[in-house]
Image (cartoon, helix red, strand yellow):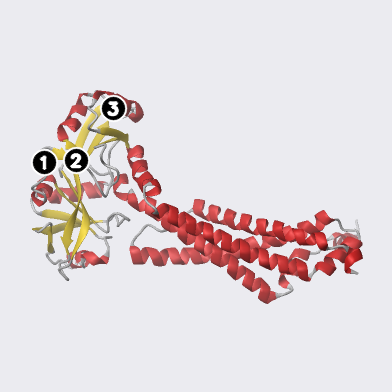
C-alpha cells in the first residue's frame, strides 16, 4: 500500500474538532466558563469534605477500641451525651461462652484548664483500667501502663491549640501539670487521635483517677462496656443472644453498629449534615446556571453557522452531538483545577482545625459525576436553541 495514499486518505477522513474550535474561539469566554465550573466544583469538594470529616472525626475514638461488642445505656444518643448504666450488666455478659473478656469505660466531657492562659475548655475524658487490652494500637496500650499512678493522664497531642502547648512542653522535657474538673493532674505521656465536632481534644486516665474527678458518679456506674469475643465467634449472633438475656436498661451493639449509631446521630439528629449537603447542592445549581449561560450564548452566536451545516446535509442529531461534546469538554477542563484546589484547601483546613479532611477516591468520583451531570444537563437545555437553526429563516 502506498504510504502517501494512506496518509491522504486519513487526512480526508479525519473529523474536525468542531466542539473544541467553538469553545476556544473566544478564550475569555472559555476562561470565565472554566472559572465558574471550577468554583462550583471547589464548593462541592469543600462542603462534602466537611460533611465527611464530621462523620469520620465523630468516630475516631470509637475505631481505636479493641472490641467486638459494645454495651451502652439506651438513653445514650451520641458520644457528647453518654448516660451511665450498672457495671454489673457488663459482668453478666461473661456468662456467655463466647465472651472472652470485658473492659468497663468511663466517658465524659470535663473542664481542662490551659496551663499557659489558665482558661478552661471541655475535653473528652476516658477512664479505664490501664491493664486492660482496650486499644487496637499496641503502642497506645503500652503507654496506658503510665496511668497506674493516680493523678496521671495521657494527653492527645492533636487536640486544638486552645488547650495550651502541652505536647510542645512535654517533648521539651518539662513537667506538664494542669487542672481537670478542679483537680490537679500531671501529663504522663502523649497519644494522637485528634478532635471531632463533639470534642476539641481527648484525655485518657485510669478509672481511679476518673472517679476522683467526678466523685458524684453513682457507685458501679459506667458509660461504656467493651466485650471481646472468642476467635471465630459470630458477633451478630452473640449480640442477639445477649439482647435477649440482659435487662432492657442496656443495649448491645456490634462495633460497626456502635460506629454507625454515632454517625447516624450527626447525620439525622442534627442540622450539620443537611447544611453541608445543601451547600454542595447549591454549588451544583450555580454551576448549572453558569454552564447553561455559556453554552446558550455559544449556540446563539453560531446559529447561522449551524444553519449552514444543516443546509449542507448535517442532521440535527449531529449538531446536538457538537453541543454535547462542548459540555463534556467543559466538565473535564473545569474539574481538573477544582480537584487541585480541593487538595490544597483540604490541607489548609486540616492544619487549621486538625479535622480529618482529606481527598478520597469516592468523593473525587462523586464530584466529577456531579460536574459531568451539571455540564451535560446544561448542554441539553442549550440544545433547544438549535431548533431555531432553520436555513430558510436565517438566510
Left or right of 218 on screen, residue 313: right
Rendering coords of residue 68 (x, y %): 30, 35
* Pointer 2 residue: 84
Distance between mark 2 and mark 1 Cα atoms:
9 Å
Q: Position of residue 85 (x, y in %)?
A: 19, 37
Cα gap from disc 3 to disc 1, whole angstroms: 24 Å
Question: Dot 2: within a 10 Å radius of its alpha carbon, few (fewer than 14), some, or many (20 or more) residues?
Answer: many
Residue 187 relative to residue 365: left or right: left
Q: Which residue is mark 3?
A: 243
The residue depicted at 25 percent of the width and 60 percent of the height is 157
Q: Is residue 65 visible?
A: yes
Q: Position of residue 307 (x, y in %)?
A: 86, 64
Residue 337 can be seen, yes or no: no
Q: Nearer the viewer, residue 29 or 349?
A: 29
Q: Which sits earlier in the primary sequence, circle 3 or circle 1?
A: 1
Distance of mark 2 from mark 3, alpha carbons? 18 Å
Amino acid at each position: 500500500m502506498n504510504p502517501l495514499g494512506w496518509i491522504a486518505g486519513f487526512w480526508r477522513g479525519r473529523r474536525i474538532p468542531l466542539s473544541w474550535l467553538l469553545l476556544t474561539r473566544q478564550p475569555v469566554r472559555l476562561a470565565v466558563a472554566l472559572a465558574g465550573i471550577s468554583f462550583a466544583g471547589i464548593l462541592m469538594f469543600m462542603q462534602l469534605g466537611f460533611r465527611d470529616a464530621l462523620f469520620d472525626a465523630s468516630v475516631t475514638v470509637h475505631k481505636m477500641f479493641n472490641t467486638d461488642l459494645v454495651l451502652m445505656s439506651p438513653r445514650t444518643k451520641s458520644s457528647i451525651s453518654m448516660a451511665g448504666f450498672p457495671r454489673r450488666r457488663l459482668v453478666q455478659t461473661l456468662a456467655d461462652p463466647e465472651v472472652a473478656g470485658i473492659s468497663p469505660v468511663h466517658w465524659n466531657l470535663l473542664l481542662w484548664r490551659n496551663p499557659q492562659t489558665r482558661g478552661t475548655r471541655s475535653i473528652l475524658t476516658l477512664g479505664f483500667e490501664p491493664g486492660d487490652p482496650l486499644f487496637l494500637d499496641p503502642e497506645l496500650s503500652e503507654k496506658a501502663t503510665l496511668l497506674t499512678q493516680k493523678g496521671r493522664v495521657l494527653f492527645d497531642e492533636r487536640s486544638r491549640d486552645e488547650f495550651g502547648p502541652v505536647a510542645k512542653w512535654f517533648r521539651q522535657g518539662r513537667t506538664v501539670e494542669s487542672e481537670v474538673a478542679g483537680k490537679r493532674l500531671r501529663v504522663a505521656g502523649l497519644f494522637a487521635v485528634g478532635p471531632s465536632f463533639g470534642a476539641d481534644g481527648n484525655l485518657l486516665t485510669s478509672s481511679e483517677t476518673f472517679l476522683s474527678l467526678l466523685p458524684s458518679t453513682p457507685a458501679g456506674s459506667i458509660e461504656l462496656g467493651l466485650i471481646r469475643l472468642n476467635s471465630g465467634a459470630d458477633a451478630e449472633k452473640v449480640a442477639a443472644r445477649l439482647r435477649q438475656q440482659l435487662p432492657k436498661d442496656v443495649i448491645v451493639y456490634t462495633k460497626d453498629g456502635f460506629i454507625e449509631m454515632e454517625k447516624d446521630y450527626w447525620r439525622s439528629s442534627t442540622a450539620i449534615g443537611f447544611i453541608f449537603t445543601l451547600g454542595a447542592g447549591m454549588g451544583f445549581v450555580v454551576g448549572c446556571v453558569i454552564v447553561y449561560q455559556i453554552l446558550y450564548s455559544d449556540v446563539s452566536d453560531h446559529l447561522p453557522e449551524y444553519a449552514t451545516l444543516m443546509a449542507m446535509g448535517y442532521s440535527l442529531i449531529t449538531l446536538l452531538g457538537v453541543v454535547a461534546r462542548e459540555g463534556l469538554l467543559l466538565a473535564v477542563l473545569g474539574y481538573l483545577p477544582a480537584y487541585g484546589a480541593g487538595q490544597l484547601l483540604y490541607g489548609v483546613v486540616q492544619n487549621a482545625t486538625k479535622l480529618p479532611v482529606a481527598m478520597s477516591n469516592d468523593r473525587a468520583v462523586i464530584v466529577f459525576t456531579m460536574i459531568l451531570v451539571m455540564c451535560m444537563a446544561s448542554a441539553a437545555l442549550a440544545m433547544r436553541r438549535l431548533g431555531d437553526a432553520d436555513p430558510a429563516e436565517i438566510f
